[in-house]
Amino acid sequence: MKKISRILFIVLIIIVGWCIYNLYSENRAKQAEELADENLLQSGDIIFQTSLSAQSQAIQDATNSKYSHCGIIFKQNEQLFVFEAVQPVKKTPIKEWIQRGKNGHFVVKRLKNSDEILTQPKLQKMKEIGLGFQGKNYDLSFEWSDKNIYCSELVWKIYKRATNLEIGKLQKLSEFDLSGKVVKSKLKERYGDHIPLNETVISPESIFKSKLLETIIEN
C-alpha cells in the first residue's frame, strides 16, 4: 500500500506541475495578445524562444545560446502570425507559437530605424519572399541551399533578399562548439562520419546579437 501511495503521490505532483506549466504558458500567450492589442508588435519584428524540439539542446550548446528558435512576425487582417521554418515552413498564430516554447518565454527584437527601412513595399516584398519558402521541408542538415530551410536561415534570407541587410553574421559549421556530448550525438545522427565543417550557417544566436536590432519586448 505504501508503494502504491508513493506512486499516486508522484503522479499527482506530475499532474499539478503540468497544470502549472500550462497555466504559465497560457499567461505568456495572453500577454502577447495584449501586446498585440496595444500595437507594440509590428510586421518585420523577429521573435525568439527556447524550443522544446529534440535538437534544441544541441543548438544551444553549439552556439552558447539560450535561444534555439526564431521567426518573423507578420500582421494579417489585424491578426499576428509568426512566419517560421518548422516542418514544414509555415505561418503560425503568435499565441500558439509562444505556447510551444519553453516556459512561454520569448524575446522580440526590431530593426533599428525600422520606420524608415521597413516601408510597406519592403514589408510586402518580405511577405512575398516568405511565401516562396512556405511549404518547404525543414532542413535537418542545415545546408545553405533553398531546397530545405531552417529557422534562422529563413529569417536571414527574407531580410537579405527584401532589404539587402544581413541580420547576423554568417559562419562555418566548424566555428561552433562541437565538443559537447549532445552536439556530437546529433552530428553523428545527421551526418555520420562526414560532417560538413565548411558549410555556411546562420544561428539564432547570431541574429539575436545583431547590432542592427534592438530589444522591444522580453517576456
Image (tube, rainbow, N blue to C red):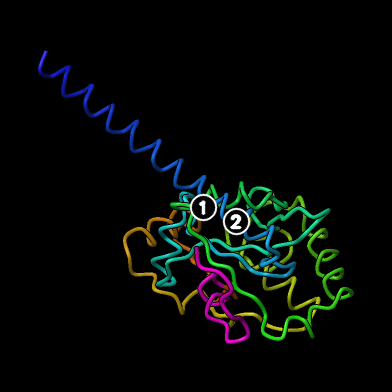
Taking the magenta stretch, the answer to whether it contains residue 99 is no
Q: Picture coordinates of residue 154 (x, y %)?
A: 68, 65
- Residue 28's disc is 1
Q: Picture coordinates of residue 136 (x, y %)?
A: 74, 53
Q: Which residue: 87% across, 73% down?
A: 120
Q: Picture coordinates of residue 27 (x, y %)?
A: 50, 48
User: Which residue matches tag 2?
Assistant: 32
**Residue numbers of the magenta segment:** 203-219
- Is 68 located above or below residue 97 in the figure? below
Check whether the beta carbons of the residues at disc 2 and disc 1 lie within 8 A of each other.
yes
Q: Picture coordinates of residue 29 (x, y %)?
A: 56, 50
Q: Secondary structure at mark 2?
A: helix
Q: Amino acid at mark 1?
A: Arg
- Local packing at callout 2 (Cα closer than 10 Å; few below 14, some 14-19, many 20+) is many
Q: Identify which residue, 60 or 199, lies in the foreground.
A: 60
Taking the magenta stretch, the answer to whether it contains residue 210 is yes
Q: Identify which residue, 181 or 124, lies in the foreground.
A: 124
Q: Secondary structure at mark 1?
A: helix
